[in-house]
Amino acid sequence: PRHVEIQVFGDQHGSIVYLGERDCSVQRRHQKVVEEAPCPVMTAELRQAMGTAAVKAAASVNYVGAGTVEFLLDQSGEFFFLEMNTRLQVEHPVTELITGQDLVAWQIRVAEGQPLPLKQDEVRLTGHAMEVRLYAEDATQNFLPQTGTALRWEPALREGIRIDHGLVEGQAITPFYDPMLAKVIAYGATREEARRKLVRAVEDCVLLGVNGNQRFLANLLSHPEFAAGNATTAFIAEHFASDPSLSPQPPKASELAAAAALLFQQSANARAHQGGLAGWRNAGSAPWRFLLKQGEQPFAVELEVLGDGPQPSLLATIGEQQVSLKLLASDGRWATLELDGIRQRLAYHLAGDNLWLYGHNGNLQLTDITHLPVNSAASAGSGSVKAPMDGAIVEVLVEEGSQVSKGQLLVVLEAMKMEHPLKASIDGVVRRIGISRGDQVKNRQLLVEIEAAEA
């Protein structure tokens, strides 16, 4: 079925109107992902029937203010009541855009005792609007909420795009609130125009420093079934479960080449003590070698300088792949490169050995470990249980000395209104517990150490 909701509004004088519908069928874990108005399969007769039913439900309790009456709509056109949300919902901007009304202003007007601004026969629906929610989450880890710092945030504001947010650069993304960072809304004369605008806006919103769900959203909006208006509540499970955005993707060779060029430029500028693209020398000398790490995966990049001057040609070798490039300009925020003859502009943030690039998978973080001793970054091993994000410990289910089995629940972490079970990855004995119930912990903090059982 489809999940279709009707926006209603009542005043203190007994008047109630409905302001069209919103289709919120695309969901994950019963949470809305895309909201649009009007519903792609709505007819005038069905809208009137659903709107009348919603108004009757609100009138039965003398409802005052903004409310949303939610229904399931089947293929035959029958609809079934789900619930009523007695508030202005996250997705209200799509209704505002197709009606031309400010629903927050309506709320204030109603609270002041004034009548509704429009009668039912004065409500007009024009065009199409579509909204997605930009979350701090990792789609490759079952949408695990993410914490960190918004090192860069540049919303893609342009004609036909509305972005509701309160995010500023340098802001900490903490575990204490819902992970929603922004709402990105597009308006067009047709559904297809709105969809295309929204895809481009989602792709062009620059977010660095914390993982976001842009790639997931852009891929979803571009899926042929969604583009055709055929999505139901089963859309993600039936058509999107194998999408590349839901599994870890290695960086492209072009992204690794760009990263190596930016890191090389930083070292060259440091030596030259001057601005611009100074320090590009060593034509004919041995290639520069970089070891870059994404998560726990290292990537070797060999960078050869093929000429002198401020913009020399470079050749990057990554395994069996080679990328020809030039770094034409960089200012600490944007880099202009020529990659295999194609000019590109990339957002980036470089701090010490850490580089964030806004790439084909969204926010890409790479660490330059070229000069680290081989054994200095060794992990604690599979017997170490670490916090996957900042949060609070709500349960500790084992004690030091306890025998545990692989898969056994050890600790429950609460973050961003969700509980996250942490389990043993090996059989063994708990040797150390570094936390207690109620403790606040940081991302990657060591919580429990397990000594592997002897074979």
Image: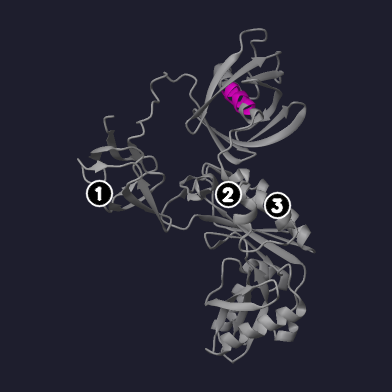
Three-letter amino acid code at disc 3?
His
Q: Residues within 10 Å of mark 1 (few under 14, many from 20)?
A: some
Coordinates of residue 305 in the picture (x, y in percent): 67, 15
Looking at the picture, tell me which residue is in the foreground, 224 or 299. 224
Which quarter of the rendered picture does the C terminus lie within?
top left
Find the distance from the CA under tag 2 to the CA under tag 1.
Answer: 32 Å
Label of residue 213 in the image: 2
Q: Which mark is residue 223?
A: 3
Q: Secondary structure at mark 1?
A: loop
How many numbered circles does the render carry?
Answer: 3
Q: Is residue 397 visible?
A: yes
Which residue position holds label 1? 436
Most common secondary structure along the magenta stretch:
helix
Query: Looking at the picture, which amino acid does disc 2 mark?
Result: Asn
Magenta segment: 257-266
Q: Quadrant of residue 237?
A: bottom right
Pick the residue in front: 269 or 299: 299
| Residue drawn at point x = 54 percent, y = 57 percent | 166
| Mark found first going from the N terminus, 2 or 1 | 2
Location of residue 379 in the rendering, given as x and y in whole percent from the top left corner: 38, 29
Vertical arrangement, residue 37 with respect to residue 203, above or below: below
Residue visible at 56% across and 87% down in the picture: 113
